[in-house]
Image: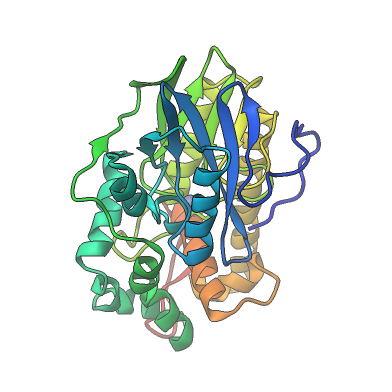
Amino acid sequence: MATPPDLDLVHPFAAPPGPGQTIEIAPGLLWARLPLPFRLDHVNIYLIEDGEGWAILDTGLDDLPSRSAWAKLMDGPLAGRPPTRLIVTHCHPDHVGLANWLAQRHGLTLEMSEAEYLTALVVHLEPEALETEPYRQFYVDHGLDGETTDAVMGRGHDYLRMVAGLPKTFRRIIAGERVTLGSRSFEVLTGGGHAPEQIMLYAAADKLFVSADQVLARISPNVSVFPRDPDGDPLGIFLRSLRAVKAQVPDDVLVLPGHDLPFFGLHRRIDAMIQHHEERCGAIVEACRAEPRSAAELVPFVFTRKLDAHQTGFAFSEVLAHVNYLLRRGRLRHARTRDDVHRVEPA
Ligand SMILES: [Zn+2]
């Protein structure tokens, strides 16, 4: 979801690479883009020189345009130098979608954090799980309408349509360890909230920070409650992670995000994202002053533009993340209401 433009982020590259092209961000570090069939119409991938060839960071989702974009890259800027490693930052389809396909074609081992791999694996093992009770009741309890409930409950199958399977084994990447790619040494950070254990890579000597979707320049990554952990606090986890990144990674790095343009201004951007969520929390508490409201009833107070059922599903899950965050911190409480719908009021 869009947040107000930041005052003074600096974008050293004004335009992204075109289809099948790369931009050299730093010696031996290439930036490419793959198309996405969504409102957010692209994902960034990075290629890092590693001995004979290139380490791949993220893969795009599985569709024909992405597969042919990869073919163009392999025949073009990457020609003659084989992929050496395959690192995926998190389990969302635009990042892991073609991992299995690339792993099989090039004999690579998928490298991910454990929670990201297992989260992707669960969907593969039981794609219809989210369509069963008690998950449907979760949406009903929070006041979501039938059409939106059907849209969110089909997400498991949507996911599999965008992901070309998953290798049966993986290599686990762990926070605190180092990943060496060619002459570069990266410290591994992980962060939750947007995804369970998202990988970020920090190269202190080169002042480079691969932020994945944890810190983006223009949009605030989706932070959602899912019915498997209905009282979960992904927003609290996300905000803690942003503060941890700010404490660990200095402000003068070039940030290489999963979407939009690379930028300088990491700390300002983190501050703006924290403030954005605080403003949303304020709007939610305010909206509950007139009367108790459910997460579904709060959506139009937070998202003012018109949303289709699919977008409403994401908006609902994001609003619920703010509600759960406020409940945990005692700023909202459960209200007694006229029906069985869960509503909240200021505490
Ligand atoms: Zn993501």
Quarter assignment of residue 189: top left
What residue is rendered at 62% in x and 55% in y?
Answer: 280
Percent x, y of residue 72: 55, 50
Q: How is the image coloured?
A: rainbow
What residue is rendered at 34% in x and 28% in y?
Answer: 175
Q: As rendered, which of 252 and 224 lies closer to the eye?
A: 252
Residue 330 visible in image: no
- Tell me: 62 left or right of 214: left
Percent x, y of residue 346: 54, 60
- Tell me: 274 left or right of 116: right
Residue placed furthest toward the right: 7
Q: As rendered, which of 273 and 295 lies closer to the eye?
A: 273
What residue is rendered at 44% in x and 47% in y?
Answer: 193
Quarter assignment of residue 143: bottom left
- Tell me: 82 left or right of 272: left
Percent x, y of residue 180: 39, 19
Instruction: Check the image and report above or below for 145 versus 182.
Output: below
- Tell me: 149 left or right of 21: left
Residue 91 visible in image: yes
What residue is rendered at 47% in x and 58% in y?
Answer: 67
Quarter that holds the N terminus: bottom right
In this rendering, the count of numbered labels is 0
Q: As rendered, which of 285 and 128 lies closer to the eye?
A: 128
Percent x, y of residue 114: 26, 41
